[in-house]
Image (spheres, rainbow, N blue to C red):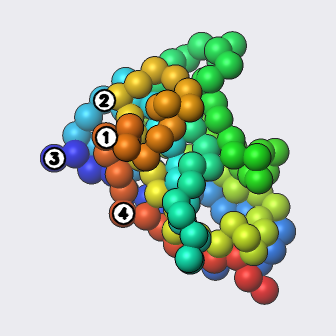
Amino acid sequence: QVQVEESGGGLVQPGGSLRLSCATSGFTLALYTVAWFRQAPGKEREGVACISSSDDSSTADSTFYEDSVKGRFTISRDNANSRVYLQMNSLKPEDTAVYYCAAAWARYCSEKVRREDTMDYWGKGTLVTVSS
């Protein structure tokens, strides 16, 4: 019954924006830390953003952004609607990848939690292509 499904990917020009959505069901999203991963052709999958299950924004590990996307991407969550979003601005060709939404039964986005093998649920991915 657990479902995680990404949407919002597509073709966008460099400098453009996309908003990815992650719809979940079958579990209580508010109890889970959620991360976005991406995998570019020929490269390993990497974590790009994470948002904790805690509502304490003062906690250092409440959010995480990979250095290459920091300042351009914003992760957010809507627990009432069981959704997580990734707003991507100023997109670059190197952002081209399949983007995955994943959830872990954890409180914070610590380095340990952000590991792929820590994630409990995964979506199938949505393709983002940044090209002119």
Quarter of the image with the C terminus in it: bottom right
User: Label 4: which residue?
Assistant: 124
Mark 2 or 1, nearer chain start: 2
* Circles 4, 2 touching at the beta carbon (< 8 Å): no
Q: Residues within 10 Å of mark 3 (few under 14, many from 20)?
A: few
Mark 2 belongs to which amino acid? Answer: Thr
Q: Which residue is mark 2?
A: 28
Residue 46: tell me if it is visible: yes
Q: Residue at x 35, y 51 (%)?
A: 122
Q: CA distance from mark 2 to mark 3?
A: 12 Å
Query: How far apart are labels 2 and 1 at the CA level?
Result: 13 Å
Question: Mark 1: which secondary structure?
Answer: loop
Cα separation, mark 1 vs mark 3, equals: 14 Å
Q: What residue is rendered at 46% in x and 20% in y?
A: 107
Q: Position of residue 105 (x, y in %)?
A: 35, 28
Task: Please name the residue that numbered disc 1 is placed on.
Answer: 120
| Circle 4 Cα neighbour tier, 10 Å, few/some/many (<14 / 14–19 / ≥20) | some
- Which mark is in front, 4 or 2? 4
User: For this rendering, which residue is in front, 121 or 88?
Assistant: 121
Left or right for 108, reference 62: left
Q: Which residue is mark 3?
A: 1
Query: Element under label 4?
Result: loop
- Amino acid identity at mark 1: Asp
Q: SS class of the residue under badge 2?
A: loop
Q: Is residue 132 left or right of residue 80?
A: right
Residue furthest to the bottom = 132
User: Looking at the picture, which amino acid does disc 4 mark?
Assistant: Lys
Under mark 3, the amino acid is Gln
Q: Marks 4 and 3: CB-CB under 8 Å?
A: no
Q: Position of residue 117 (x, y in %)?
A: 37, 43
Relative image position of residue 37 (x, y in whole percent): 53, 53
Distance of label 4 from label 3 (alpha carbons) = 15 Å
